[in-house]
Image (cartoon, rainbow, N blue to C red):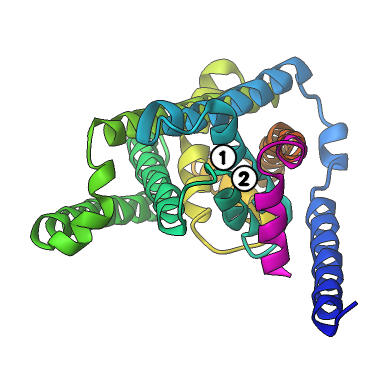
Amino acid sequence: MSAKIKVKLLLGIVITIIVIYYSFKTLKRLNLDTLLNSNMNWILVIVSIIITIYANYIRALGYTFGIDPNINRLNALQIVVIGHAANMILPLHIGDGLRFAFFPSDYHALRRTKLVMIPAFADFIAMMAISLFAVPFSGFKDHRLVSALWILFFLCIALIVLLLAILYFVPRFRSYFNEFLNIHLLKMMLWVTFSYVLLLLATWVGLAACGFGIGASFRMSLAVFAATNLVGLVPSSPGAIGLFEDGVIIGLAGLGILQSEALTAGLLLHLIQYVALVPLGIILFIVALRGDYKEAIKSMLRQKS
């Protein structure tokens, strides 16, 4: 065994240990005792999990029926779900790097980068737009959050205008994205927006499972959706554990909900995300290892080590 291989093997072992350590550390912070001792409607919890899974499937269709019809549904689902699942338990946003392995093998690095960046930008626009329009209907009273959302909304508008200006006045930059500037881009945006509407629905059902009532849970879901998406922009631990719960507490505090009740709701909503995405991500990753992307994934892991 050469020295180079030994060094790679050692680095791989170290990275694996770090990944496992952070995975268990992240999952341990979910204090499930609070949930197990609460009076939950577990049927609604299951419904919320199913809706969350379906929302990610719809998000994946933004590739197949949107920006790039050459990517089939399974590969699109792998790109979306494996990336999300990995980011929920692993540090350093490793999931974002894993997404690159699941595009068709003949796609060069620049094209893969575009196909990761463009939907990510669409995610941001959809989240902020829905969050901004959701808050006024929720009865939310915290003016700081509303002001922050307005600031982000106008930043989105300014960024879109700037990008359009660059695309129009800088031909070299336009040539990089020219292949995606068509009706398929609009279709992708519609699929992405629909997926976030479904995630809002999953939040509504999850809050109803906590016993808040259907009508009250709807207003709460609007505030929680806005608050969690806003705090989610802050760099944090894998899965935004702790920060997500803080977002739920902030959102519900503006509606007069006690912190203890809001924390229980936050833990449940976060658990729903983990149950929906992590097992599915593992299954899809195993399928990928046994399929066409085996060599691509191994090559990427070797490069990281």
Check the picture and name the quadrant holding the N terminus.
bottom right
Give the residue drawn at x 49%, y 32%.
59
Q: Residue furthest front?
A: 1
Q: Where residue 175 sits: x, y (%)?
A: 21, 55
Check if residue 303 falls in the magenta segment: yes
Q: Mark 2 points at which residue?
A: 84
- Residue 255 visible in the shown view: no
Tell me the SS state at disc 1: helix
Q: Which of 5 and 13 is in front in this view?
A: 5
Q: Where residue 218 sits: x, y (%)?
A: 50, 24
The stretch of residues the image draws in magenta is 286-305
Q: Where residue 125 sits: x, y (%)?
A: 34, 44
Q: Which residue lies furthest to the left in this view?
A: 169
Q: Which of 300 and 285 is in front in this view?
A: 300
Tell me which secondary structure the magenta stretch mostly adopts: helix
Asked if residue 23 is positioned above or below residue 69 in the image, the reply reads below
Select label 1 or label 2 by which is in front.
1
At label 1, the amino acid type is Val
Q: Name the residue under label 1.
A: 80
Q: Are marks 1 and 2 in contact (CB under 8 Å)?
A: yes
Q: Where residue 204 sits: x, y (%)?
A: 56, 25
Mark 1 to mark 2 CA distance (whole Å): 6 Å
